């Protein structure tokens, strides 16, 4: 009987580090081609440079992702249950509103359980010249039944527009894909799809679902999931659920419905972007080219990366960019010329191109911006009709943009809107329209509403007067400035927004004398006008110690480009800090212009307690040098927590050596935030002393200290020998709590190695059958990091593929020298020794693998194989059945149980077991080989027990089983099996060896190919 090789390797590199090392690898390859003479020097030198760059960065493990969802083991916490009941109810309610049928998978009434696909992410990415898509999400099962539910999440199938995809282990993917959630980046390989999800009665549980390397495309396909929950088929229409989640409503407004407004009332996720895209496609077919997306006040705020998609889509609308096909999410249709966003959440500023973002605070503002040219070109009768009876949004836009085309006789209707409408936006639009009506009645109405107690109406009237093209409006505004003291400030602001030479003399007068608030606005207005006497006015203000507008004068001077203005500001700031405690504005000026002259003036202020002392420290940090270190550290114990954190950052930036020496002293503080800052600074350090400092601090702290746990976790961000050996020792010799923390940190340290990308490339090389090249690549990794267990184990596998079993065994044993508690190395060593027929030794290692990883089905199956080879058949069957209980689809366990049944004379049961396994593994050469072994053992039993059969039937039964065995052997060869040496010596086939057909099969078998992983009979897992 033969076992199967499975490469179970997780990609654990960070995206940016991967890119850096990939670039260096490309340079190495190019130099090796151009200058083969210096191949070794260039490879090692380039890699050393790359590692030097990478070593300055350390990655931190993020635990928040898993904590967002119900745990895999399930929970009955009321708030979690209620959260998902509400989500499911929202979907069913929306489907009902859309007059769509609710799927049974979402109906608690129909099933007593419901399935919810949380945090869906459907996107595309590029890997080299290839583009792929992926789908991930958290499958949440709410079980309100009275019995436990369970299924294997790896049996879940995805259908994309009718094309079916099955689960594939992560090592089978060649693409490196990342996703974002809550502004954090994650690698797909960080998501574990378990082999079993059990949902206890009355609880809720969840797990990740991952499908990578899907066919690319910029479309928005139909997506469905399907699996079996026991005997019951379950299907989830992801597209339908996402459509309900977004709660999209749409209407068309304006002349002939020329502008579409879509409102989002629900949750936005990468899946339901397709709803928006599909609606836009439909609108484009109706020749609608301008779209507004309005976010309802109650709608949840989208993740930052989705906000970026909306912003980018808004900016790129109508640009016909060829780059849209490479977007992570689908682009909007090219026929949509404008996309405006209303009440857009968040503060995303993703795209920094020259095109302004079409983001607006209100729907009214968005519509006015979207309709900028429509009302200037439509027939006048249509314009008037829109003002009289159109949608209120269209009325406002028609008044604002179409007023220049309205006849003077239309004034009474505008005045009617202003005086009698209860719609504030409509009133403001009508007031704006009066900018095109210079008759006395219009000016008087604007003057009246400029004095209106409602600020928005008053501002609209003033803007109408200031922005008008008619001099009558300008003169009216000027007279109001002189006569209406109550609104002088607002009038000066308006003049600043619409600067005109007519107003210069008056504004200068107001800037020099009068009310301070009006002077302030007048100064800003003169700044907008570029008034030639502005600097002299500002200089006078700064010279007057009692002038309250010094701050405004400094702000204006700071915004000037000339050197004279700059020196005025700097000198004022220096003068201020010489005579009194530094004010925030002076400190801001000193920081902005890097005024080194301020350092000796600022240092004495550190000894004075003051609300602005922290800003003084920040300013010294920004402009300072070694002169500030001693004073800062001397004062450190007397500072408050916020000031201490600023000092820590300052010292780390200016003198890292002093920071390393001071870190243990700083740790004595009980302030947790100080500890967090220390950890962050140490993790960001490129110095090896950072590890030494962390270890020293960990050793000083008692086990019950929360700071100790944080420090241990942070040590996992480093990948050198010192940190790993310390964490390994801490894991094996500490209390349970510390041991768990150390184990987690150790796994992080291994997974975040800066060599991960080269390691992953080597795995890809190995999978493609180039074991000799993979050995070279993995040796390159191990030359730089000889304690990288994953790379050692992968190289051991490559050596096995090449038939160099001694080198393979050496690498496996070296893994165990690094870490005895590495179950995959224990198990792989046992599997290799099995293939070398060293069964007793193999069992020892497999015992340890099972002890360390008792839920790993393949270890039981491998030990069952060992027991079978030792002819300890009861033990073998027990292990095979244990493996099958853990993983009902494990091929080697299926055939192992069948073999045990045959050996025990339960031949019909063995044949039935093979029949069931063939449905899933019928194309597998190892399955066929093991089936041949089962038939051969069955024949052997019949031969040895003639008393159980009628003589004629006895011979016929033997002949049938022999023929079945050879049929399976032939099939295994046809499917690629070629290990003739193992076949010749396999005790399971001993009963076939005298048959001429056996010799013929051996002859047709080639020598084992190095790239044929199936000839090795292993189940490799490089995780600790």
Image: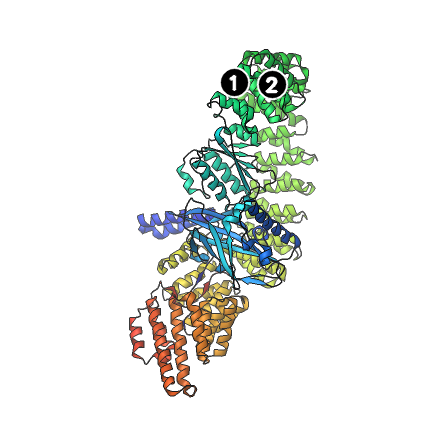
Q: Position of residue 798 (x, y in %)?
A: 39, 62
- Nearer to us in this view, 199 or 712: 199
Tag 2: Cα neighbours inside 10 Å, few (<14), some, or many (≥20)?
some
**How many numbered marks have been drawn onto this rendered protein structure?**
2
The picture places residue 887, in percent across and down from the top left corner, at: 50, 66
Residue 324, by quadrant, is: top left
Residue 512 position (above or below residue 676)? above
Determine whether the residue tagged by mark 1 lies in a helix, strand or loop: loop
- Seen at 59% across and 25% down, the residue is 426
Name which residue lies at 48% across and 75% down: 876
Question: In the rendered image of this protein, does residue 374 appear above or below residue 484?
Answer: below
Any part of residue 290 in sight: yes
> Residue 622 bears which disc, if any?
none
Residue tagged by mark 1?
Answer: 406
Q: Is residue 117 left or right of residue 1016?
A: right
Mark 1 closeness class: few <14, some 14–19, many ≥20 residues within 10 Å: some
Dot 1 or dot 2: first in sequence order is 1
Where does residue 352 sit, x and y in percent of width and height?
Answer: 48, 34
Cα distance in 3D space between marks 1 and 2: 13 Å
Q: Quadrant of the N terminus?
A: bottom left
**Compared with residue 314, is residue 398 higher up or lower down, i.e. above or below?**
above
Q: Pointers 1 and 2 in contact (CB under 8 A)?
A: no
Colouring scheme applied when the structure was drawn = rainbow
Residue 686 visible to the viewer: no
Label 2: element kind? helix
Q: What x and y, as percent, mark residue 632?
A: 64, 39
Can you tell which mark lies on residue 415?
Answer: 2
Out of 11 and 580, give the one closest to the viewer. 11
Q: Residue at x 42, y 63 (%)?
A: 796
> Does 911 sit left or right of 365 as displayed?
left
């Amino acid at each position: 009987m033969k076992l199967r090789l499975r490469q179970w390797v997780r990609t654990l590199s960070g995206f940016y580090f991967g890119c850096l090392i990939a670039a260096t690898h490309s340079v190495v390859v190019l130099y090796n081609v151009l200058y083969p003479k210096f191949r070794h020097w260039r490879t090692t030198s380039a890699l050393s440079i790359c590692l030097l760059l990478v070593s300055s960065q350390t990655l931190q493990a993020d635990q928040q992702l898993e904590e967002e969802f119900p745990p895999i083991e399930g929970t009955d916490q009321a708030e979690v249950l209620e959260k998902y009941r509400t989500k499911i109810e929202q979907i069913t309610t929306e489907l009902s509103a859309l007059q769509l049928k609710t799927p049974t998978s979402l109906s608690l009434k129909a099933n007593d359980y419901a399935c919810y696909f949380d945090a869906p992410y459907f996107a595309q990415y590029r890997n080299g010249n290839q583009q792929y898509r992926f789908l991930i999400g958290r499958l949440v099962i709410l079980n309100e039944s009275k019995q436990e539910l369970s299924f294997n999440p790896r049996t879940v199938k995805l259908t994309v527009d009718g094309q079916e995809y099955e689960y594939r282990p992560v090592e089978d993917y060649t693409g490196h894909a990342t996703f974002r959630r809550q502004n954090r980046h994650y690698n797909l390989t960080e998501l574990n799809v378990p082999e079993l999800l059990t949902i206890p009665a009355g609880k809720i549980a969840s797990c990740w679902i991952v499908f990578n390397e899907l066919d690319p495309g910029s479309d928005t396909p139909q997506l469905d999931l399907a699996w079996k929950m026991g005997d019951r088929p379950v299907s989830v229409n992801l597209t339908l659920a996402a459509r309900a989640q977004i709660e999209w409503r749409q209407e068309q407004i304006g002349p002939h419905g020329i502008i579409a407004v879509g409102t989002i009332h629900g949750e936005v996720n990468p899946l339901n972007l397709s709803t928006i895209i599909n609606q836009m496609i439909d609108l484009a077919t109706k020749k609608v080219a301008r779209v507004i997306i309005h976010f309802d006040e109650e709608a949840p705020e989208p993740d930052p990366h989705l906000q970026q998609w909306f912003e980018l889509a808004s900016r790129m609308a109508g640009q016909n960019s060829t780059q849209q096909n490479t977007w992570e999410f689908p682009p909007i249709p090219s026929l949509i010329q404008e996309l405006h966003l209303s009440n857009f959440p968040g503060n995303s500023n993703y795209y920094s191109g020259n095109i302004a973002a079409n983001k607006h605070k209100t729907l009214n503002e968005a519509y006015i911006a979207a309709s900028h040219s429509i009302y200037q070109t439509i027939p006048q009768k249509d314009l008037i009709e829109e003002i009289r009876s159109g949608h209120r949004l269209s009325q406002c836009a028609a008044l604002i943009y179409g007023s220049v085309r309205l006849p003077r006789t239309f004034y009474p209707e505008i005045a009617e809107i202003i005086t009698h409408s209860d719609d504030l936006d409509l009133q403001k639009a009508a007031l704006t329209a009066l900018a095109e009506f210079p008759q006395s009645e219009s000016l008087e109405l604007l003057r009246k509403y400029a004095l209106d107690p409602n600020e928005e109406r008053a501002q609209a009237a003033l803007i109408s007067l200031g922005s008008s093209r008619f001099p009558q409006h300008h003169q009216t505004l000027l007279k109001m400035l002189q006569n209406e003291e109550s609104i002088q400030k607002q009038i000066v602001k308006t003049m600043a927004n619409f600067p005109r030479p007519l107003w210069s003399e008056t504004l200068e007068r107001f800037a020099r004398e009068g009310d301070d608030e009006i002077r302030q606005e007048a100064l800003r207005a003169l700044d907008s006008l570029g008034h030639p006497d502005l600097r002299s006015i500002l200089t006078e203000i700064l010279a007057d110690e009692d002038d309250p507008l010094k701050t405004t004068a400094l702000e204006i001077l700071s915004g000037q480009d000339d050197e004279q203005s700059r020196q005025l500001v700097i000198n004022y700031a220096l003068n201020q800090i010489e005579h009194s405690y530094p004010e925030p504005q002076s400190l801001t000026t000193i920081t902005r212009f890097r005024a080194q002259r301020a350092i000796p003036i600022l240092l004495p202020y550190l000894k004075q307690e003051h609300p602005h002392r922290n800003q003084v420290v920040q300013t010294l940090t920004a402009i300072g040098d070694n002169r500030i270190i001693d004073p800062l550290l001397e004062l450190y114990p007397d500072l408050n927590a916020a000031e201490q954190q600023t000092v820590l950052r300052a010292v780390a930036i200016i003198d890292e050596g002093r920071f390393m020496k001071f870190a243990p002293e700083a740790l004595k503080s009980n302030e947790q935030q100080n500890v967090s800052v220390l950890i962050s600074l140490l993790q960001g350090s490129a110095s090896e002393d950072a590890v030494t400092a962390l270890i020293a601090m960990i050793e000083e702290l008692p086990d019950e200290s929360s700071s100790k746990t944080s420090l241990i976790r942070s040590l996992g961000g480093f990948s050198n020998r010192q940190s790993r050996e310390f964490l390994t020792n801490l894991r094996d010799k500490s209390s349970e709590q510390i041991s768990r923390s150390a184990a987690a940190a150790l796994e992080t340290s291994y997974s975040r190695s800066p060599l991960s990308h080269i390691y992953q490339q080597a795995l890809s090389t190995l999978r493609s059958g180039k074991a000799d090249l993979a050995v070279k690549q993995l040796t390159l990794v191990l030359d730089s990091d000889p304690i990288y267990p994953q790379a050692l184990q992968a190289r051991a596998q490559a050596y096995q593929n090449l038939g160099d079993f001694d080198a393979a065994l050496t690498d496996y044993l070296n893994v165990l020298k690094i870490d005895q508690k590495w179950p995959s190395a224990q198990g792989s060593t046992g599997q290799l020794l099995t293939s070398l027929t060293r069964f007793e030794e193999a069992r020892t290692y497999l015992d340890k693998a099972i002890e360390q990883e008792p839920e790993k089905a393949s270890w039981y199956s491998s030990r069952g194989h060992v027991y079978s080879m030792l002819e300890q058949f009861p033990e073998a069957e027990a292990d095979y059945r244990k493996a099958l209980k853990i993983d009902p689809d494990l091929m080697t366990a299926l055939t192992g149980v069948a073999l045990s049944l045959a050996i025990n004379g339960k031949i019909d049961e063995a044949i039935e077991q093979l029949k069931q396994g063939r449905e899933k593994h019928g194309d597998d050469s190892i399955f066929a080989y093991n089936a041949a072994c089962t038939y051969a053992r069955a024949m052997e039993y019949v031969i040895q027990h003639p008393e159980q059969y009628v003589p004629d039937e006895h011979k016929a039964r033997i002949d049938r089983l022999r023929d079945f065995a050879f049929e399976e052997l032939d099939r295994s060869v046809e499917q690629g099996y070629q290990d003739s040496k193992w076949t010749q010596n396999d005790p399971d086939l001993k009963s076939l060896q005298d048959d001429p057909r056996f010799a013929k099969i051996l002859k047709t078998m080639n020598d084992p190919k190095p790239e044929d992983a199936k000839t090795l009979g292993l189940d490799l897992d490089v995780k600790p």
